[in-house]
Image (cartoon, rainbow, N blue to C red):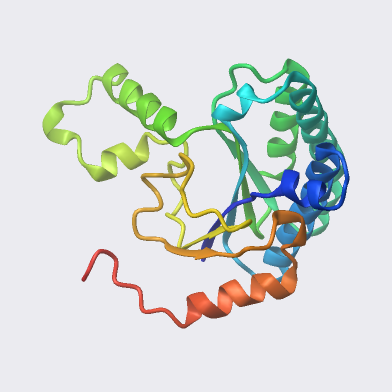
Amino acid sequence: MHIAIIMDGNGRWANRRGLPRHEGHRAGMLRLLEIAEECAKRKIEQLTLYCFSSENWKRPETELDFLMSLFREYLNKGRESLVRNDIRLSIIGRRTGIAEDILAEMDDAIALTKHHKGLHLCLAANYGSRGEIVDAVKRIVDAKIPSEQIDEQCISAHLYTSGMRDPDLLIRTAGEQRLSNYLLWQLSYAEIWITEKCWPDFDATEFDRALQDFAGRKRKFGGL
C-alpha cells in the first residue's frame, strides 16, 4: 500500500495556541517522525509526504530560514529512526535553490538507507507536480524518444517517481479540499480522505480512521 499525505495546518495549529508559526512547524516535524514509524510498524510499503512545495519559496524569509533549519535537523536527527525502523529514504523535487549542505545531508541519508527493506519514505521537497511533468517532458525530448513510443508508461518512467507505484490513498489534514499541485499524475485513481485535524494533531488514532475508511471503499479505477 502506498499512502500520500499533504501535511497541512502547522501554522493554524500554532496560531490557535498563541504560539509562533515556527512552533507549529516543529510540532509537524515530530508528527512526521511518529507517522513514519507508525507506517513502518504496520508494514506499509510506501509513505510519500509533501514537505515543501516549490510555491513555498514565496513565504517570508524568516520562515523559510526556519523551515530549512528544520529540514537540516530532520536529516540529522531522523537518521536514528530511519536505521532503527529499517526505513528507506528517497527525496523527490528540484534541487535548485536548496543549500549545498542540505543537499549533502539528503544524499548521505539516502545512501545510508538505500539497502533498507522496510517502509519506503519519500519526501517531496521543493516539489511541484506541474514542474515535475515539465521536467519529464524535457527528459523525453532529450532522450529523443519517437512520438509513437510516448505513452502513459513512458511518461511515468520519466517522472521523479519513476519506479514507484502510484498512491492508493491521499490524506490531507486541516480540512482543505484541493491537491495543491501535488502528484497530479500519480493521484489519478487514489482514494482521498480529508480530516479537519491539523497535521500536528494527526495521531495514530486519526490514522486508523483514515485506514478503516479506505478499507471500506470499493475502488473503481476510473469506472463509474
- Which residue is located at x 34 percent, y 54 percent? 188
Q: Would residue 189 appear left or right of 196 to someone viewing this image? A: left
Q: Position of residue 42 (x, y in %)?
A: 67, 72
Q: Position of residue 218 (x, y in %)?
A: 36, 79
Q: Position of residue 58 (x, y in %)?
A: 61, 22
Q: As displayed, is residue 51 above or below residue 200? A: above
Query: Which quadrant: the C terminus?
Result: bottom left
Residue extending furthest toward the left: 148
In the rendered image, is residue 115 in sight?
Answer: no
Q: Quadrant of residue 114?
A: top right
Q: Quadrant of residue 63?
A: top right
- Which residue is located at x 61 percent, y 29 percent? 56
- Which residue is located at x 70 percent, y 55 percent? 199
- Which residue is located at x 54 percent, y 25 percent? 94
In the rendered image, is residue 16 in sight?
Answer: yes
Q: Position of residue 88 (x, y in %)?
A: 67, 49
